[in-house]
C-alpha cells in the first residue's frame, strides 16, 4: 500500500477504507510516512472532506496510536465534557464538583492552555498546593472515593493527533472540520469516557466564528461519538462576548466559587446547569433534563456543590480554605478601573479582543514556553444590553505592572456603546443529539 496512492485516491474524491486509514496513521506516528506526504493528505482532506465512516475510522486510528485510559474500575457511567474554547470559559471548574455532588462520576483529564488564559489545570494550580501529578491508580481511587478528580494529559495520549495537529498548524489545514472533529473526539475517547457532552462555541471569541460552521462541527463530533459507541450530544453556545465576567486564572477560580455559591454570573450559571443536566441524564443519575436541573440547583442552594469543591481541592493537595478566603488566591498588585467615556447601552463586547487584552497582562500563553501570571486578568462589569453611565467602570484590570495603556486601549476598542437599548444575544443557540 503506497502512501502516494492513498493521497491520490483522496485527492480525487475517493473514500479511504478503515485498513488504509489505520496504515496511514500508524506509518505517520512511527515515522515511516514523512511530513510532506501527510501534509499532502491533510490538504486533500481539507478540500475533499471525509465521509462519516472515514471520520470515525480516523478518530479510532488516532485513539489507538498511543495509550488509552481504562476507567472501568470506576463505578457508574463516566461522562466527559469538552468545550471548543473561548474567553472566560470557566465551566469545568464549576461543572466537575457540581455534577459530582449529585452522583455523576467525573474523571477528568485536562491540559494547559495556549491562548487568552491558561487551561483548566493552570486555573486549578492558582489554588495553593493543588496538583495534578497523580498516577492512574490514585486518580481512579479519588474518583471512586470522592466522585471527582482531575489529572494532567498523558504525553502518550493520541500521539498521532499531536503530530498531525502540529503539521496542520503550519500547512494551512487547521480549519478542516473532519480533522478538528477527529482530533477532539480521539482525546475524549482515549481518556476513557463512556459518554460525552460537547460545548461547541460560536461567535467572535470562538474557534468557529460562523454558526453554520459550528453546527457542522457539532454534528460531525456527535456522529463520530455515536458511531464508535459513546453516547454524545452537543450544546451550541454563544461566544460573541466573554462567558461570565472574569478572564484570568485566579480570577476565574474566584468566579467558579461564586457560581457554586449561587451568586455567579447568570450566563455562566445557566450554561453549567444546561451542560450538567445533560451529563446527569447520560450518566443515568436523572431520567430527564428537568429532573437533572432541579438536582443541580438544589445542590448549589444547599451548599453540597461547594462542599464537593472543597473536598476535590483538598484531596489533590490544595488549600480548600481559598473557598472561604479568596484573598489566599494569587493577587495582582494593581487594580485599575476602565471608565466608560459615554452613557448608553452596551452594544458589543468583542470577546477575542478582550482575551488578547488579558494575554497582554500575562494571563495566557503565546507559546508553550510562555510563563503565565496566575494573578492577572480582567473582570468585566457589563454585558451586552446593560445600561452604562459616563464614568462608570466597564472593567477592572488586575495587573502586576502599572503600565497598562495597551490593555486599556484594547478594552475601549472592544466595547461599543450606543444610545438606544440593545437586546442581548441568546446564550444557548442550539443542540445536536
Image (cartoon, rainbow, N blue to C red):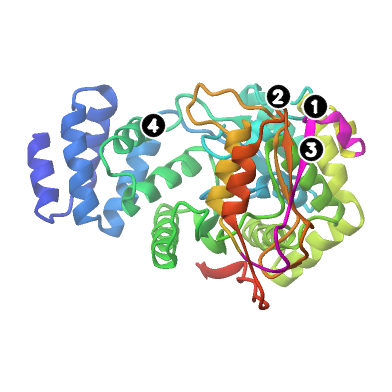
Under circle 2, the secondary element is loop
- Picture quadrant of residue 360: top right
- Picture quadrant of residue 151: top right
- Front tag of 1 and 3: 3
Of residue 283 and residue 163, the one placed in the foreground of this image is 163
Q: Say if the magenta span includes residue 326.
A: yes
Question: Relative to residue 276, is residue 192 drawn left or right?
Answer: left
Of residue 359 and residue 162, the one placed in the foreground of this image is 359
- The answer to which of marks 1 and 3 sits earlier in the sequence is 1
Can I make out residue 118 in this image? Answer: no
Under circle 3, the secondary element is strand
Residue 77 drawn at (x, y percent): 63, 50
Q: Say if the magenta span includes residue 200.
A: no
- The answer to which of marks 3 and 4 sits earlier in the sequence is 4
Question: Relative to residue 341, is residue 65 drawn left or right?
Answer: left
Real-space Cα separation, disc 3 to disc 2, in angstroms: 28 Å
Please state the extent of the stretch shown in magenta in the rendering.
324-347
Real-space Cα separation, disc 2 to disc 4, in angstroms: 24 Å
Query: What residue is disc 1 on?
Result: 318
Residue 88 drawn at (x, y percent): 64, 48
Residue displayed at 77% across by 50% down: 98
Real-space Cα separation, disc 3 to disc 4, in angstroms: 39 Å
Circles 4 and 1, Cβ within 8 Å, touching? The answer is no
Real-space Cα separation, disc 1 to disc 2, in angstroms: 7 Å
Under circle 1, the secondary element is loop
Mark sitting on residue 162: 4
Few, some or many residues within 10 Å of mark 2 (<14, 14–19, 20+):
many
Circles 1 and 2, Cβ within 8 Å, touching? The answer is yes
Query: What residue is disc 3 on?
Result: 335
Mark sitting on residue 131: 2
Amino acid at each position: 500500500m503506497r502512501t502516494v496512492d492513498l493521497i491520490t485516491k483522496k485527492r480525487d474524491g475517493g473514500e479511504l477504507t478503515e485498513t488504509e486509514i489505520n496504515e496511514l496513521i500508524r506509518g505517520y506516528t512511527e515515522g515511516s510516512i514523512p511530513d510532506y506526504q501527510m501534509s499532502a493528505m491533510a490538504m486533500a482532506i481539507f478540500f475533499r472532506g471525509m465521509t462519516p465512516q472515514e471520520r470515525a475510522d480516523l478518530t479510532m486510528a488516532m485513539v489507538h496510536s498511543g495509550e488509552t485510559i481504562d476507567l472501568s474500575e470506576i463505578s457508574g457511567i463516566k461522562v466527559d465534557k469538552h468545550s471548543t474554547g473561548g474567553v472566560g470559559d470557566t465551566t469545568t471548574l464549576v461543572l466537575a464538583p457540581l455534577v459530582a455532588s449529585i452522583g455523576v462520576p467525573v474523571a477528568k483529564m485536562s491540559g494547559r492552555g495556549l491562548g487568552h488564559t491558561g487551561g483548566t489545570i493552570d486555573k486549578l494550580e492558582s489554588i495553593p498546593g493543588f496538583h495534578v501529578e497523580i498516577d492512574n491508580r490514585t486518580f481512579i481511587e479519588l474518583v471512586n472515593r470522592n466522585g471527582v478528580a482531575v489529572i494532567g494529559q498523558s504525553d502518550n495520549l493520541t500521539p498521532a493527533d499531536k503530530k498531525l495537529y502540529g503539521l496542520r498548524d503550519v500547512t494551512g489545514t487547521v480549519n478542516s472540520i473532519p480533522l478538528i472533529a477527529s482530533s477532539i473526539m480521539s482525546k475524549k475517547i482515549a481518556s476513557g469516557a463512556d459518554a460525552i457532552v460537547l460545548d461547541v462555541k460560536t461567535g467572535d471569541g470562538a474557534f468557529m466564528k460562523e454558526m453554520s460552521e459550528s453546527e457542522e462541527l457539532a454534528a460531525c463530533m456527535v456522529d463520530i461519538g455515536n458511531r464508535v459507541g459513546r453516547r454524545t450530544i452537543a450544546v451550541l453556545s454563544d461566544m460573541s462576548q466573554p462567558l461570565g465576567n472574569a478572564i484570568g486564572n485566579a480570577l476565574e477560580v474566584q468566579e467558579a466559587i461564586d457560581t457554586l455559591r449561587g451568586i455567579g454570573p447568570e450566563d455562566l450559571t445557566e450554561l453549567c446547569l444546561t451542560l450538567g443536566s445533560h451529563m446527569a441524564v447520560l450518566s443515568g443519575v436523572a431520567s430527564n433534563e428537568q429532573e437533572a436541573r432541579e438536582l443541580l440547583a438544589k445542590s448549589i442552594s444547599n451548599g453540597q456543590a461547594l462542599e464537593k469543591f472543597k473536598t476535590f481541592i483538598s484531596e489533590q493537595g490544595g488549600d480548600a480554605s481559598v473557598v472561604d478566603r479568596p484573598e489566599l488566591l494569587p493577587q495582582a498588585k494593581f487594580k485599575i478601573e476602565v471608565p466608560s467615556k459615554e452613557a448608553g447601552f452596551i452594544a458589543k463586547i468583542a470577546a477575542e479582543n478582550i482575551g488578547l487584552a488579558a494575554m497582554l497582562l500575562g494571563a495566557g500563553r503565546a507559546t508553550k514556553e510562555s510563563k503565565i501570571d496566575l494573578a492577572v486578568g480582567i473582570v468585566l462589569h457589563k454585558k451586552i444590553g446593560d445600561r452604562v453611565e459616563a464614568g462608570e467602570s466597564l472593567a477592572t484590570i488586575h495587573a502586576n505592572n502599572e503600565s497598562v495603556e495597551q490593555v486599556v486601549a484594547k478594552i475601549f476598542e472592544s466595547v461599543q456603546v450606543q444610545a438606544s437599548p440593545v437586546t442581548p444575544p441568546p446564550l444557548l443557540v442550539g443542540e445536536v443529539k
